[in-house]
Image (cartoon, rainbow, N blue to C red):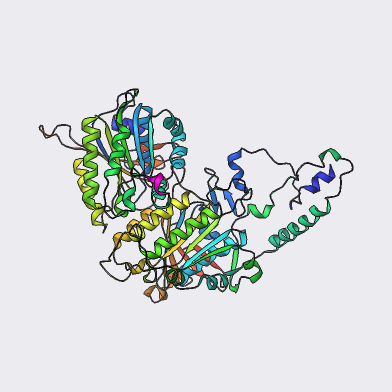
Amino acid sequence: MAALATGGGMPSDGATSFQRKVPASSRLATIAGTRPSVRHGQLLLSSGLPSLDCVLGGGLAVGTLLLIEEDKYSIYSNLLFKYFLAEGIVCGHNLFVASAKEDPADILKELPAPLFDDAHKNQVNEKETAIKSKQESQESMKIAWRYQNLPRIEVSPAASARIGHYYDVSKMVSPELLQSTKWHRFFVPEEMSLHPEIKTCNMTCGYTRLLQSIQRIIYQEGFDGSYPQKKQKNILRIGIQSLGSVLWGDDICCTDNPEDIYSLTKFLYVLRGLLRMSLSACIITVPAHLIQNKAIMERVTNLSDTVVGLESFIGSERETNPLYKDYQGLIHVHKIPRLNSLICDVSGTKDLAFRLKRKLFTIESAS
Amino acid sequence: MFLELNELLNASPERPEQGKLTLLCDTKTDGSFLVHHFLSFYLKAGCKVCFVALLQSFSHYNIIAQKLGVSLTAAKERGQLVFLEGLKSCFDVLFGEEQHVGQTNPLRFVSEDGSNLKTMYEFVRTSLMASGSDSWKCPVLLMDDLSVLLSLGVRPVDVLDFIHYCRVAVCSQLKGNIVVLVHSNDDSEDEANELVVNSLCHQSNLILWAEGLATGFCKDVHGQLKIIQKGSSELKAERNLLRIYQYKIQDKNVTFFARGMSAAVL
């Protein structure tokens, strides 16, 4: 029996390799970096910031969209964007990065490095020794020889039950970690130069291309379940930077009467359909303060699942207000989704502020 | 369905009303619990329901309906429920193959230039038309939600035309009901949306308006529900009945109480 116990990998807290029989539907919980919500089993991801996860009720649900209304100079919204992608790298998810002004490769190089505390480092070391010991125990079992040909029981390591990591903003992610990640890119200038102008369904060209690109990746990599034989499921984290800005070919940010006010909302609707039918989650930053036509922002809010607005104090009179002297800005949570349930896990505090210390970005209640 | 709401509306699944247009409206809060209520109410009443769900997936409604005691998959199988999943239809229109899409996809207007809701109206009409073997009571059209159509490029006048056509077909010819959800805001700058909401308020027989509390977020009172019942006869000039209740949403139920009488306060 001893051979069987070590064959299952080394759990860090001494748990046995006994695995409780769970119904088939909750086996989805074995996707790395996710955990089921306590309320209704909906799979939750971390947004990269544990304090934001608390505010959002445990995390971001798989298949939903997180919309960030950018602060005035997009400094902190870019930071949230990078946290989301960095969390994907650490959890081993696939990434899709779309941007109009920065090359996605440059964005990925500047992601913050994860902070491993000692306990986690031990778990990482133990995972490595567990893999080594699994290879060693391939030799034949002497006593429990009838169990020789059974498949090894995989005990999910405790590390994957933990979602949410801390990042060091002052350090960049290591190139080795980056290389082990599978990611896809969409950079507007190079996509536009590849093909001539086409307009389908009357959406701005950039949006149409982006939708086609996302749909192609979801279909080819099997995130929508089109390859059931692939046992190892994974999540696709989609990050779209500054959607709606002029560089995407949309003029809602520069004029009171834009030519086409429906492009962005149509894009969000189709994207919602794509997200709901696949194992993915999306973060989009939108320069809301530039959009003059407020009706568009109302419709965008209705079409998104989670909407968070950032308001930074740079250049405003609040910078010198003694009430806010420890903080760099406020966070407004405009909307939290109610998925598969009549209620949602909304946190009680509504006055939230964020601060960026030398290394860490945290969200606290402003009091 | 929420039993307390049935009592407040004086409605019962045994004798559902006929020929009514009910408007569900929400302001600064999420009014989708009303949609779940009416969906399970009409399914329990034995009516044939055509549900146009534009914003959420089928499994979302199914999981919540199961908590309320109704199975949507079973209802679909026995033909009582016709479910249009807007997100999936839109995906088929844009990314599906041409021959599969055909000319009858209700969301064809997304890819076309105009804001023509004719195919959606045809879809509603054919699904609610009584076929010979049906034994269901009055047909019901349930829409969640109408404001999304405006975001997809449909003009407000086309939305109102669509509702008018549906009222003629469903309420008047088939003696059924229509329940529609819209979003609204007092200080909204979305004029097209406000136009549709005002017009529907004028036409509907019953308005359920869910609002967030004016004083802000509260853990025990999630919002306020205004029930406006239009007088049944215009000739007698009966006054509209306006009642206001506050509500708290729980996992499987919504409790309603008079203003200021929340259990947490008493």
Tell me, yes or no, if residue A158 can be seen here.
Answer: yes
Q: Which range of residues does the magenta coloring cover?
A: B96-102
- B190 sits to left or right of A163: left
Quarter the N terminus of chain A occupies? top right
Q: Toward which corner of the image does residue A26 lie, by quadrant?
A: top right
Image quadrant of residue A167? Answer: bottom right
Percent position (x, y) of residue A345? 48, 49
Q: Is residue A346 magenta?
A: no
Q: Position of residue B140 (x, y in %)?
A: 31, 33
Quick one: which residue is furthest to the left in this view? B235
Is the residue A364 above or below the residue B28 in the image?
A: below
Residue B98 painted magenta: yes
**Residue B183 placement (x, y as % from top left):** 30, 49
Q: Nearer the viewer, residue B102 or A249?
A: B102
Location of residue A4 in the rendering, given as x and y in whole percent from the top left corner: 81, 44
- Total numbered circles: 0
As drawn, A252 above or below B82: below
- In this rendering, would A291 be left or right of A77? left
Identify which residue, B246 or A80, lies in the foreground: A80
As drawn, the residue found furthest toward the front would be B99
Give whichever of B96, B39 is nearer the camera: B96
| Residue A366 visible to the viewer | no
